[in-house]
Amino acid sequence: MSHSRLLSILAVLAILCLALTPGPAAADRWLCPDCPDEIVERAPDSPELVCPGCGRTYQQLDLIPPVGYINSHTRDADIAWIVQSENCPLFREDGLQALDDQAQIVHVPWSMVEYYIPRMRLLRLTNGREMKTDYPGRNSTCPNPPPFLFETTDSLTFPGQPSTAFKQEISETMAELFIVAFSPEARDSARVRFITEVEAGKHPRLPRTQPSLIRAPEIHLPPALGSPDLKAEAVVEVRVHERRGIIGAKMISGTGNPQLDQEAMRYARMCPLGTGGELGVGVPSWVEVHVIFEGQGGRVEIKPAPRGFWRG
């Protein structure tokens, strides 16, 4: 092979190597915590956020609140705020991805977030600005939303029995949480926003669903209680857990006969009820069970409780 031919081959190989060598990663656009109208370019692997507008340098820990105040299945919980977002570009340890007024991607430090409602794709900043986000449960953009582990407490409350508490460990992802906030007051504010928008029908894709009666129990009264001319109704309000069935009951209006009321409570507690839902997620909810006595038998009907889902 001639010398000139060898040099030509080497030159081509050098050009190919340069073309295949990855260059530096494109910088992400971030909001500055102290001058949020300033867009800061930051390399994805940089441990610092340096703002040319205010001249401040923010370390990773400056952008991460220590505690998150969340709401899951209508229950509040406080957690150590640790975000692990493998294969999910929407979330980083120190911030999340949002859309600015021109629908361009911008990253927001967690320390700037007042509250975040993932299922509504709504982000509110501490300065009052609101932004849209992508939905973290979408496989194409976030196949593995960050997981969180926490504990919730519920009470078993039935007439004539002492109330007892039961705890359960819950593991949920960012896509399943109702509310993420960084103060209890912000969580309360987000809850009002959440309930108002759901009840106004602003999210028809994921509507509220009421508990359903899977199978009505057959009513057979003892001979001493039933009679051909008996017509009476009792209303029992029951609490339906999203996983455990009925966890509470109380008499709202009775028949005037204590023995019939005991039967009504017994039949209400026998009802197999499918749980209600909020924005596509099962939640604990209240429902009225109407136990109607007629002769020796009767029937059971259920109606939504007028005081709503979000009571404790």
Image (cartoon, grey):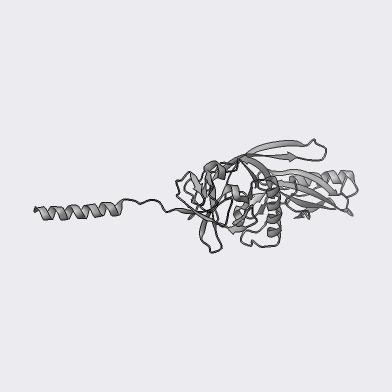
Judged from this view, the residue extending furthest toward the right is 256
- Which quadrant of the structure image shows residue 246? top right
Residue in view at x 60 percent, y 43 percent: 65
In the image, residue 10 above or below residue 204? above
Q: Residue at x 69, y 45 (%)?
A: 184
Q: Is residue 252 visible?
A: yes
Q: Residue at x 42, y 54 (%)?
A: 26
Q: Residue furthest left?
A: 2
Q: How far across and how far down the image is residue 105, in percent?
A: 51, 58
Q: Residue 169: give x, y in percent of width and height.
A: 62, 38
Of 162 and 125, nearer the camera is 125
| Camera-side residue of 225 and 112 | 112
- The answer to whether residue 213 shows anywhere in this view is no
Of residue 181 and residue 259, the one placed in the foreground of this image is 181
- What residue occupies the far bottom of the structure in this picture? 102
Find residue 140 and report its horizontal and vertical position in percent: 48, 55
